[in-house]
Image (cartoon, rainbow, N blue to C red):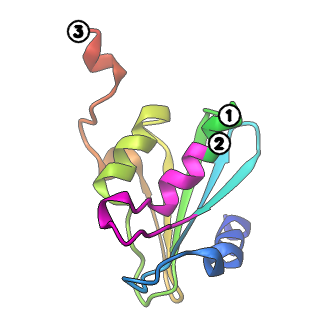
Amino acid sequence: MEELIEKAKEVIGNAYAPYSKFRVAAVVKTRSGKIYTGVNIENASYGLTVCAERVAVFKAVSEGDRDIEVVVVYTDTEEPTPPCGACRQVIAEFNPNALIIMASKKKVVESNLSQLLPNAFTGEKLRT
């Protein structure tokens, strides 16, 4: 997983965070072995800001690659940052059991999306 964290470190400089100054990079690895990156992109109209995790997931999906295995979230902070609730929900759409790696300058924490988002709302709920 170190190579995925390194990839996130490489792209964090592309984050557009002029308001919060809180830069985030994400890397999505799919079952095909392909890797997709994303960074947070802020907007003066704050509600239009998009998280790095969603950018990476949407890039994968837009390329037809929906089998997400791993999501890395990297911040250049002291402590790792987990995905926000919206990002957790988006990831759950494609794999409610995805491995989530949260990394910072000094620490790496691994979790499972089902631990971060128990009882996720998925398409299964729409069929019952």
Reading the image, the residue beneath label 3 is 128
Q: Which mark is residue 65?
A: 1
Q: Which mark is residue 60?
A: 2
Q: Which residue is drawn at 23% across and 36% down?
A: 119
Mark 3 vs 2, N-terminal side: 2
Circle 3: element type = loop
Q: In which quarter of the image is the N terminus?
A: bottom right
Q: Residue at x 41, y 68 (%)?
A: 43
Q: Residue at x 41, y 42 (%)?
A: 90
Please give the range of residues in magenta: 39-58
Label 1 – label 2 distance at C-alpha: 5 Å
Mark 1 vs 3, N-terminal side: 1
Farthest residue to the front: give it. Answer: 44
Is disc 1 in contact with disc 2, using a CB cutoff of under 8 Å? yes
Q: Please, what is the three-letter code of the amino acid marked with disc 1?
A: Asp
Note whether 34 is above or below 31 in the view shown.
below
Q: Which residue is drawn at 39% across and 48% down?
A: 113
Q: Does the magenta stretch include residue 75?
A: no
Q: Position of residue 87 (x, y in %)?
A: 39, 51
Q: Position of residue 84 (x, y in %)?
A: 33, 59
Mark 1 vs 2, N-terminal side: 2
Q: Nearer the viewer, residue 101 or 12?
A: 12
Mark 3, Cα crowd under 10 Å, few <14 / some 14-19 / many 20+, is few
Circle 1: element type = loop
Mark 1, Cα crowd under 10 Å, few <14 / some 14-19 / many 20+, is many
Tell me which corner region of the image, top left, top right, bottom left or bottom right, holds residue 78. bottom left
